[in-house]
Image: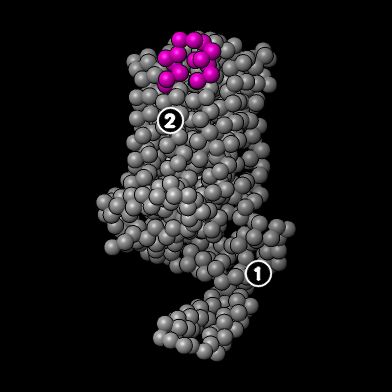
Amino acid sequence: MGKVIKRIRVVLCLVEKVGVADDDAIEQVQHEKSSSLTNIILCEQWQEQTQTYESQVGEKALYSKQLVQPKYCPFILGTLESMTGMLLGLDMSTISGANLFMPQYLHLDTKQFSLVSSGAALGAIPGAILLTPINEWIGRKYTLIVCCLIFTVGAILEAAAHSYGTMIAGRLLVGVGIGLSSTAPVCVSESVKKEIRGKLVVLFQFNITVGEVIGYVVAAIFVNVPGNWRFMLGSSLLWSSLLLLFILFLPESPWWLMKKGRKAQSFLVWKRIRSFENLESITEFFEMEKAVLEERKLAQARPFYWLDIIRVPRSARAFIVANVLAGIVQLDGINSVVYYIGVLFKELGFSAEKSVYMSLVGGGSLMAGTIPAILLLDKWGRRMVGIGPSIVVFLGCIIIGCSFLAKNTKTYEGVYIWGLITYELFSGSFQSLPWLNFAEVYPTYLKSVGMTIADAFIYLWAFTVTYNFTGMRHAMTNTGLFVGFYGGISLFGVIFLVLFLPELKGKTLEEVDVIFSQPMSEIARANLRSSINTLKKLFTGRWKEIVQTDSQVLDN
């Protein structure tokens, strides 16, 4: 802390010695001088508080030295916490493989088969609803531990099932664990700086796709083993057990510790994962302390303050954007395709064994498509990474739908696989957007509630499309489902993103408030201008300008 104060004093001395030639320069120097003086005052106040915290932690401060430097720690923590996303991916791919064999063994009819396939998504709804109360009660770390425990019990029931009832019980428990796994993006967003927030939050989606690929590999390994579907479904408990061991060694969220009044412990965790060696980290810690105190006062004054999410116009606009986005990314059919991909390949004429192997193509495409989102979200921005892939997802729906019209089997297979790869490859980036959007659009005191509602909506729509997949195919035909319904939702998604998804890359909370304090018509007008300017740059060859930082502050 003392080093930071010294650096500010040096800057202040340099500012006082600057020779100025005009009024603008004078004004700039005076502004810098004023800011430096303010920073010195704040730093001296914070230094006193820091010393108080150091004395409170006592002997624990001796162990604040760590093997991993703070500049690497957020990446390691973010990676380990986000690995809970693998549980969702594993469930999607292992049930896809098991669906080729398990329904015949358990003698499932069409409705039972649909409910077993969508059971995890159904269980994830109450899991997501319980997210906020459990998070506030036992903390982020122990919520992730509970998530792994519940998932493990569910996987055991699935693998041991000899009846429809036992299988449904296992599927629902697995779903509850999946719903609670959404704690990871909350925990990551509370602990890292905004410059890397995007890529670390999106790691959750990337780990979903990694889990899918691992699940397809496991399904391929056991496809010719007697009782294959039991091994496929039971394999996921190995991963949940390993994740449980990893999570035991992770620190609790400093934000949650601060909310529980354990300030010294919050300080110690922050020191380990972010350090107190630079002004930015120091400022963020004490701003967090201030925000927590304000939230506590608000909760005491207004017990139902969370109703602000629909009552206050600024929050209501964020609510609309977050939850419409949650609907779009599920109603475009991605979960139903992943859950039933093995069945779809079998209908193409592939054997059960080859269907499992071909499922790896779809899973690998989805994982590969997520990588650009991790690399580019904090560089190109949310709109660029969202709008472009959403257009190609729409085209992928059209290609898949048209493949069913082919008369020649080889043509049918070739066009279908082409459409599937296109669809899943670009869905990878598009599907990354919601988790980050949920963490960014709400004011601090409503973030937890907002993310809980958005997560519940995601799983509600996932259950809806997965459960009704077979019925919709019969009612609408395969072409009608993919072109008419999934394609129509995807096209609506493109229009919605162009008009109503604001650019939040690198934005402070105050800047996000400015954006959502404007009417939706103003947001749409500003976004439309931005899109038109981007298209002009694209067609005139000014590609470098497209990826430059765009402030996206709405004009009055």
Extent of the magenta region: 401-416
Residue 394 makes an appearance in the image? yes
Local crowd size for mark 2, using a 10 Å CA cut-off: few (<14), some (14–19), many (≥20) = some
Tell me the quarter of the image containing the C terminus.
bottom left
Q: Nearer the viewer, residue 145 or 327?
A: 327
Say what amino acid the circle numbered 2 marks: Leu
Could you tell me residue 171's position as x and y percent?
Answer: 50, 26
Residue depicted at 34% across the width and 42% down the height: 496
Residue 327 makes an appearance in the image? no
Q: Is residue 353 above or below residue 537?
A: above
Report the residue marked by disc 2: 395
Query: Residue 214 falls in which quadrant of the image?
Result: top right
What's the mark number on residue 295? none
Question: Farthest residue toward the front?
Answer: 540
Report the residue marked by disc 1: 58
The chosen color scheme is one colour
Could you tell me residue 315's position as x and y percent?
Answer: 32, 53
Q: Secondary structure at mark 2?
A: helix
Could you tell me residue 322's position as x and y percent?
Answer: 38, 45
The span from disc 2 to disc 1 (Cα, nearest Å) is 61 Å
